[in-house]
Amino acid sequence: MSTIPKLHYISQGATPEAHLENIKEACIAGVALVELRLLDVDDATLLHTATQAREITGMYQTRLVITDAYAIAKTVKADGVFLSNVKTSPRSARENLHSWQSIGAVAHTLNDMKALINFQVDYIALGPFGKANETSTLTSKDLDTLLQAVHTDIPFFAFGTVAIEDIQNFIDIGIYGIAVGDLLTEDFKKVPMLQKLLGGSSTQEQAWNADDWV
């Protein structure tokens, strides 16, 4: 059984500082894994922000993964890396990470899924999920078809335009969890409800309370 939390928060913000503030809010709300997705910044800015994110998540005992930048993930001792481009080789990431650091990766097609399963990544984000009238997205039916075509213990996460009302259907078709940004950034108070709908996780995600650590 996977020990990966079922609810992932993908960081958002207009500035690195905003990303960090949202990561802190996610930690306080009880999210057990956050992904620092800070794109289009120089390496120095990303390293500085990742270092601060590691300090924040460490304070709340929250897991931190970094989008794409596996060298920085190794430097700051993040819990892992998430590869958001199907062209990025998990093998290259593994060769540059500590053995204990996890690798998650995106898949858009059945071929993507098979390649990642063959490499034995730790989890796969399948999508982007969207409605039938949206272009370049996977519908619930598409996700179901793809999941039925593979046999693996690797957990799959849905990402994209995910709404609360989609979660039960995700569970029914075999999706393990969700990776979301907007859904939480607009209201971190949704965290307990989302965790309940997802069935919690082996990490027993819960809102952080300072009294628990006194």
Image (tube, rainbow, N blue to C red):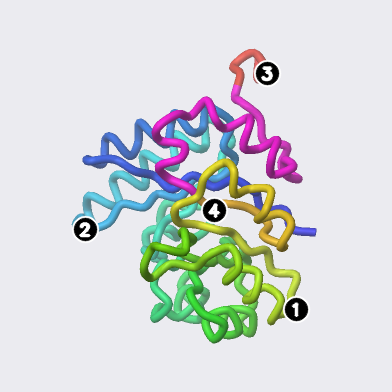
At 40% from the left edge and 35% from the top edge, which residue is drawn? 185
Q: Which residue is mark 3?
A: 212
Mark 3 falls on what kind of element?
A: helix
Magenta residues span: 180-208
Mark 1 falls on what kind of element?
A: loop
* Label 3 environment density (alpha carbons within 10 Å; few <14, some 14–19, many ≥20): few
The N terminus lies in which quarter of the figure?
A: bottom right
Amino acid type, label 1: His
At 40% from the left edge and 42% from the top edge, which residue is drawn? 182
Q: Which residue is mark 1?
A: 151
Q: Which residue is mark 4?
A: 79
Mark 4 falls on what kind of element?
A: loop
Q: Residue 193 in the image: x percent, y percent?
A: 63, 31
Q: Nearer the viewer, residue 104 or 125?
A: 125
Amino acid type, label 4: Asp
* Label 4 environment density (alpha carbons within 10 Å; few <14, some 14–19, many ≥20): many
